[in-house]
Amino acid sequence: MHQPTTEARPSIYYPYQVFAPWLPSAHPPQARQRVVIAGSGPAGMVTALELARHGVPSVVLESELQVSQGSRAIVFTRRSMEILQQVGVAQRMSEQGLPWRFGNSYYRGQRVFRMEAPHDSDDRFYPMLNIQQQYMEEYLLDACAAQPLIDFRWGNKLVQIEQEEGVAHLQIDTPEGPYAMDTDWLVAADGGRSEIRTALELKMEGASYEGFFVIADIRIALPLPTERLAFFDPDWNPGNTILMHREPHGIWRVDYQLPPGETPEQALRPESLKARIDAQLAMIGHAGTPWEMDWSSVYSARTLTLPDYVHGRVLFTGDAAHLLPIFGVRGANTAFQDAQALGWQLGCVVKGLAGEKLLANYSTERVGAAREIIDEAGKSTRFMTPPSRGFRLLRDAVLSLSLSQGFVRPLYHWRTSRPHEYSGSVLNSPGDDNALFSAGPAHGAPPRNIRLSADDFLLDHLGGGFDLLYFTEAPALPEALQQVVVAARARGVPLKVIAVGAPGPVAGADLSLPDADGHFRQRYGVPASGAAYLLRPDQHVCARWLTLDAHRLQAALNTALPQ
């Protein structure tokens, strides 16, 4: 019988709430579900919210009775905020978080590199936002609670899976005993130590790096800006690396690498934590500043992924699908992209708008994204934690040269997580004009936001289905295009038409956006009226045309929703 702890997790700044368990005795016998999601971390909840946006119900199983312990993921990228905007929590994140765009690398007391992430007036969100994971999970929980299509079950632990054609049979344990439930699809969002992955005897591919990092969250008053701080080869930790980030509520994250041979148990002893943190504070000129520990943990860098995220009726997402190092803010940010991609594609399959081939595409696209991230993250990881004598010699040479030679300093760049471009996706239209554009987001790219007015942006109007951006100055869409839109909607395809450029309303469009100064056209590389973009429900481009007719639009929709 599963008995999760009912004692609130300790914290000096976050008030943990212990939720009541969902008990089978209080509910009727379980009907077969369309989707069950195991795990209520970032990937699990965003998947549930995305499915709900597409009208698909889900059951979320969480073995614990409260949100995760410790700040964990604390840095969220602009694209993550755009995804979280779609599921309704970005405003609360922005209100409570700390935005930033600069990162600093230090060696022997000298700043040797300063990273500046791009930001312009068309961006609603900053490149990065710092906020502890507990708050992000709290906001997602509130969004789930407000969504009637999400059945959230605290204290429910998935303990057994059996699959046969078209169905997964689940055994779920609770504080009063087990119950059985069948589902069309099981989403494995149960984290880096995924018990579902273990039960299916699946192996991940990639590399694990030797060495450990301590994460320590401390409450301290430091007169420093919200910028990433990285310190290489300091006197108190020779050959190793230290990172610092400001968090809300007076908390600072300190990450430091351990010397070879030291165990996690040794590293987490209070006297060891105090000595290392005091040494770091002294190095940055704040010796003796009082501080208080909130949470600490140990992690090691791994760059691993499953080679396939679809196994029968089980779909993997987030850390259950891949393990990525934190350098470059890749963990939760990649999970959001997984969840957004899985949500719309699984939703279309469940609703009968596409065949199961679409889920194979989900796996292909997201495995490709993971491998791209692993390649980038591996470069950062090898610089932060050299895995061999040769890599250490190379890294140390860069450190030494950077004191006087500017040309090596960009090697410090930490290759921040960025949204994957599905440039080779089978969902991209092969008969469009993608190759003829000289600018704008190409096949598989995420959209470029556009500021429409003081507090109104293009991405505020996208999402929930396919979006057709049609550039025109005419008072109406061509009749043949309107007929394709009406026919698509008649078979259940969510398709919104946004006319761009006309001075007034455009018949046949759901929304008309003026573009008097041509800025929208310029950002999207549109030379004249009649051009168009088709965006998938995750807002990635799947087709673009210099001239669009009904046949080309229908072909693009057929390609994006394979049967």
Image: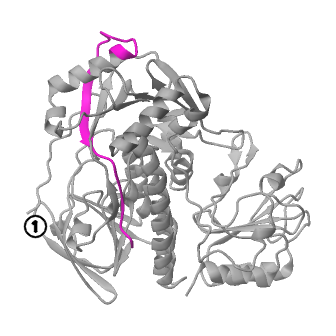
Label 1 residue SS? loop
Instruction: Examine the rendered structure and indicate whether residue 101 appears above or below residue 52.
Output: above
Q: Quadrant of the C terminus?
A: bottom right
Please give the range of residues in magenta.
282-308
Front position in the image: 451 or 269: 269
Q: Which residue is at 48% across, 73% downward?
A: 364
Q: Which residue is at 14% across, 48% downward?
A: 5
Q: Residue furthest left?
A: 1
Q: Residue furthest top?
A: 288
Residue 113: image location, x then y, percent: 55, 29
Tell me if 521 is positioned left or right of 130 in this view: right
- Label 1: which residue? 177
Q: Is residue 412 magenta?
A: no
- Say whether residue 92 is visible: yes
Q: Quadrant of the N terminus?
A: bottom left
Residue 427: image location, x then y, percent: 61, 76
Q: Which residue is at 74% across, 80% downward?
A: 431
